[in-house]
């Protein structure tokens, strides 16, 4: 059994791996669940919200936690895999306590909560024992007019007023900090589980690029709900930041009047890509493809290709293949010549032409190719990405393996069917 520290801060636990007794990771910590008592009494920590395979969130009772040590959580390994359902008598520390406005009784200081600590009581129960509070920032008078960060305080739970009941005054600053440090898929999972009011606060505060990344990872119903909360101009800006294929899927789920309004507000080039994707029948190569693969001319060198695929915004599947076409090099391109696999290019001299290493024997997909056709081609030739070419021989896009999986998996696969609460 691992040695458990005397005090553990909740915000530092988010994302920690959870291990079973055999040393296998079974999930990650996403939040703490507590039972609130009367004002001033230390809340009892009931357990952890853990994210396991498939982004399912389950409840791990503290009685199953055997240790918290060196950035890891250890359990007995006997976990109930039923989906976590928050009860009305429970409070989430990360989701509902951070950024609460509170008052420190002993000093009268008012500030917001940026962390909460828990520790084990003598009876072995875990309780919330300390609260970290930050005063509002102050404006420094002078030519620079800078803001000075507010003073911080760490005080006993009993010395804080304003956490025992829901507070009408709650921002999202520190919750946002935690979300910003997560991968987009993990951030989406956390936002999905937030109460509606907290979700709105977070969505409003995220910048357009980050919100676009998160939207791409959320279930379709959540996407539609969040877009409806935004004003039309901001919604259009966020859609522009999304990949065209994801934006097209989302817009297709909106009421026709709303969809047309947003398309009109988007930049013409971005809207054109989305409209083109929406023109194809559902579950065809045209509907699921990305119109922005890495495209090079026949005079490009291997060094040029490697420089292009280093773009950090590309997914691994997009960066695995370059497409060689005659100008113009934006979809729909000039005549499609073939694809070059990066694995092959890595074995070629940097100064040699990409055109000399083409896989021109692969028959490209057509925009009307069915889902089964796409799956068969990619499985047969062990491809992570495949070209989509129209009847005129122009490259119009590429289907990647992640696009394919999105369409092969059941609808709303990101939101697993609920299987009841805790016993």
Image (cartoon, rainbow, N blue to C red):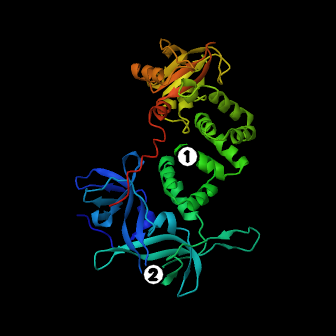
Q: Residue at x 67, y 30 (%)?
A: 275
Measuring from the top left, give residue 201's x and y in whole percent: 61, 60
Measuring from the top left, give residue 253's x and y in whole percent: 61, 39
| Residue 367 as seen in the image, left or right of residue 159 | right
Mark 1 nearby-residue class (10 Å; few <14, some 14–19, many ≥20): few
Give the labeled residue for mark 2: 38
How far separated are the C-alphas under marks 2 and 1? 37 Å
Q: Can residue 288 be seen in this view?
A: yes
Measuring from the top left, give residue 57's x and y in whole percent: 40, 54
Instruction: From this view, report whether residue 175 is shown above or below residue 307.
Output: below
Which of 106/422 is in front?
422
Q: Which mark is residue 213?
A: none
Q: Can residue 301 be seen in this view?
A: no
Instruction: From this view, report whether residue 24 is shown above or below residue 177.
Output: above
| Residue 50 as seen in the image, left or right of residue 308 | left
| Residue 85 as seen in the image, left or right of residue 78 | right
Q: Which of marks 2 and 1 is nearer the N terminus?
A: 2
Q: What element carries label 2?
A: loop
Instruction: From this view, report whether residue 159 is shown above or below residue 222.
Output: below
Q: Is mark 1 on a helix, strand or loop?
A: helix
Mark 2 nearby-residue class (10 Å; few <14, some 14–19, many ≥20): few
Most extreme residue toward the right is 143
The image quadrant of residue 9 is bottom left
Which of 352/48 is in front?
48
Measuring from the top left, give residue 3's x and y in whole percent: 27, 67
Q: Which mark is residue 221?
A: 1
Instruction: From this view, report whether residue 76 is shown above or below residue 36.
Output: above
Quarter the N terminus occupies: bottom left
| Residue 342 as seen in the image, left or right of residue 125 | right
């Amino acid at each position: 059994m691992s040695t458990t520290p005397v005090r553990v801060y909740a915000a530092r636990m988010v994302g920690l791996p959870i291990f079973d007794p055999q040393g296998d990771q079974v999930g990650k910590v996403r939040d703490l669940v507590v039972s609130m008592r009367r004002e001033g009494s230390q809340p009892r920590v009931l357990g952890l919200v853990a994210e396991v395979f498939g982004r399912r969130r389950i409840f791990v009772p503290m009685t199953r936690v055997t240790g918290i040590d060196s950035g890891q959580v250890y359990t007995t390994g006997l976990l109930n895999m039923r989906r976590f359902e928050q009860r009305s008598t429970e409070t989430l520390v990360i989701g509902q306590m951070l950024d609460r406005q509170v008052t420190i009784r002993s000093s009268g200081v008012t500030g917001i909560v940026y962390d909460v600590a828990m520790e084990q009581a003598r009876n072995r129960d875990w309780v919330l024992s300390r609260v970290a509070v930050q005063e509002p920032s102050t404006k420094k008078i002078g030519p620079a007019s800078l803001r000075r960060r507010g003073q911080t305080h760490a005080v006993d739970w009993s010395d804080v007023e304003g956490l025992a009941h829901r507070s009408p005054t709650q921002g999202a600053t520190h919750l946002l900090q935690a979300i910003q440090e997560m991968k987009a898929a993990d951030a989406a999972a956390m936002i999905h589980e937030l109460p509606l009011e907290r979700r709105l606060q977070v969505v409003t505060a995220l910048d357009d690029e980050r919100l676009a990344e998160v939207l791409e990872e959320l279930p379709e119903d959540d996407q539609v709900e969040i877009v409806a909360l935004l004003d039309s101009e901001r919604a259009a800006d966020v859609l522009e930041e999304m990949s065209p294929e994801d934006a097209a899927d989302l817009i297709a789920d909106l009421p026709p009047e709303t969809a047309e309004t947003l398309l009109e507000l988007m930049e013409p080039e971005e809207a054109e890509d989305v409209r083109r994707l929406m023109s194809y029948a559902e579950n065809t190569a045209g509907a699921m493809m990305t119109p922005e693969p890495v495209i090079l001319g026949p005079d490009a060198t291997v060094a040029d290709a490697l420089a292009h695929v280093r773009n950090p915004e590309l997914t691994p599947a997009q960066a695995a293949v370059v497409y060689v076409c005659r100008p113009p090099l934006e979809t729909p391109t000039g005549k499609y010549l073939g694809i070059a696999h990066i694995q092959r290019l890595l074995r070629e001299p940097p100064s040699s032409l990409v055109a000399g290493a083409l896989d021109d024997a692969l028959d490209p997909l057509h925009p009307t190719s069915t889902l089964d056709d796409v799956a068969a081609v990619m499985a047969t030739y062990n491809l992570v990405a495949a070209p989509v070419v129209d009847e005129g021989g122009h490259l119009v896009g590429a289907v990647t393996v992640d696009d394919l999986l999105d369409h092969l998996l059941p609808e709303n696969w990101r939101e697993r069917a609920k299987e009841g609460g805790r016993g």
